Amino acid sequence: MSDPSTSGDPGGGQPSLAGPDQSGTRSGSPPLPDHERRVRLQTLVISRWIAVAGQTFALLFVRVALEFEFAFFLCLGIVAASAVLNLAVSLSYPTGARLSNRGATLSLCYDVLQLAALLYLTGGLDNPFALLLIVPVTISATVLSFSSTLLLVTIAVAIILLLSVRHQPLPWVAEGFALPGLYVAGIASALTLGVVFITVYAWRVAAEARRMQDALAATHLALAREQQLSALGALAAATAHELGTPLGTIKLISHELVRDVEPGSPYREDISILATEADRCARLLAELTQQPESGHERPLAVLGLRALVASAAERHQPNGIVLRIVTAADNQGPEPRFVRLPETEHGLGNLIENALDFAAGLVEIRLSWDDREARIEIADDGPGIPFDIMQKLGEPYVSTRTGNGGMGLGVFIAKTLLERTGAEIRFGNERDRGAKVVIVWPRGILEEPGSP
């Protein structure tokens, strides 16, 4: 079974994780996780401009107003380096660019090291602005991955410990004044604990927010897929109504031709096939327009797994392809018995039909189960699913069968219907040749309560 429903773009060059990326995705690959592309470059640029302005004002105030003697021009050079970096980034990338996790980590690491250099030249932990070492770590805890945050925490704590013992002294007004070593150790301990506790708290709050955001995104996606399926249902009903009259005419004429053509005519076989297919189309349209039954259950409302698969497969003509249903020999427990749902049969039927379309000579349906799950594998010996479109299987209105009238809806409908019954669908390829679809139900979701 080749790809039934997608046409992927070829894999392109993968952008560096260290640089900005407007799309948030890798070419030919699935989207990055949510936290990988949540940091706008402009946000970090604005934060750095604020830091540059504050550092410049503090240096000028201490040098001019307080008349402290220190490495003033060297400190201004360090601040100017941040300003140059900001200008370069602002001119090189668009305003809406987003940083990858690695790029944002490098940017925040620079901010920590730049602040550490200024603190080293202006008194170390004696400088009250040492508290600002907490800021980049807190930002990381709210938007970056755990490993990135752990790296920044490690760097910040190492800098705090280093500055507690090595730094240039501040030229206090009182000559020879120095803070007691025990007090400096207390400041180092307080800053270290502040970095750790604030980081842990911010990380937990941000992680909870991310979980809620992911849940909302999944809900929106599910609602969107339901809306697409509902729209397809309305389209199917309208199409069935419009096709009813011309199909009835075709069916009537084809049966008259079968009756009128002589038995030995070379056209009789073709006309018989035409009449049979017209009858089949009429049955399918009848199913589309059939109202749900009320007041009584369908015949054979509960089926075993093998019977369910056989029922889904019986309406599809192999056309010279061998269709084989195989039950695993090492199954555990009794065969699952499922409530017979239209969604299940139609979804399985679509996947089986797709496998028959692309198989070279064999489609094998493998059934297995244990105490936890029921499993169906639909495998064929066709060309298989191209790797670059594997991730897009199940999306609507895209197809590789552009020349054969395919609309790219078969696998989308099948996947949506089966997922509504609680199934998990996975697409892949066989080791040697062909494609494979794996459908797994947790045992008990569809199984009839009280079945043996």
Image: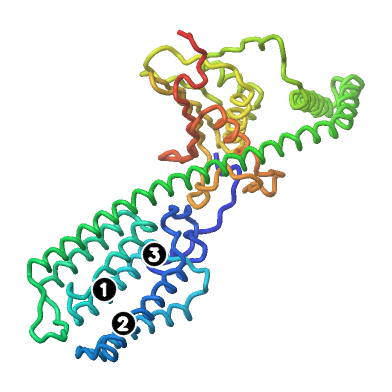
Q: Which is more foreground, mark 2 or mark 3?
A: 2
Mark 2: few, some, or many residues within 10 Å (few <14, many ≥20)? Answer: few
Residue that numbered label 3 is attached to: 17
Residue that numbered label 2 is attached to: 58
Question: Mark 1 touching mark 2, by CB under 8 A?
Answer: yes
Q: State how far apart marks 1 and 2 are (Cα).
A: 10 Å
Question: Mark 1 touching mark 3, by CB under 8 A?
Answer: no
Q: Amino acid at mark 2?
A: Ala
SS assignment at label 3: loop
The quadrant the N terminus occupies is top right
Q: Amino acid at mark 3?
A: Leu
Query: What is the x, y in percent for residue 194?
Result: 24, 59
Q: State how far apart marks 2 and 3 are (Cα).
A: 35 Å
Q: Amino acid at mark 1?
A: Phe
Residue that numbered label 1 is attached to: 129
Residue at (78%, 25%) from the top-left corner?
289
Instruction: Reply above or below: 23 against 261.
Output: below
User: 405 or 123: which is nearer to us?
Assistant: 123
Q: Which mark is residue 406?
A: none
SS assignment at label 2: helix
SS assignment at label 1: helix
Earlier-in-chain disc, 1 versus 3: 3
Query: What is the x, y in percent for residue 169?
Result: 14, 82
Query: What is the x, y in percent for residue 108?
Result: 33, 68
Instruction: Reply above or below: 310 against 401.
Output: above
User: 120 or 155: which is nearer to us?
Assistant: 120
Earlier-in-chain disc, 2 versus 3: 3
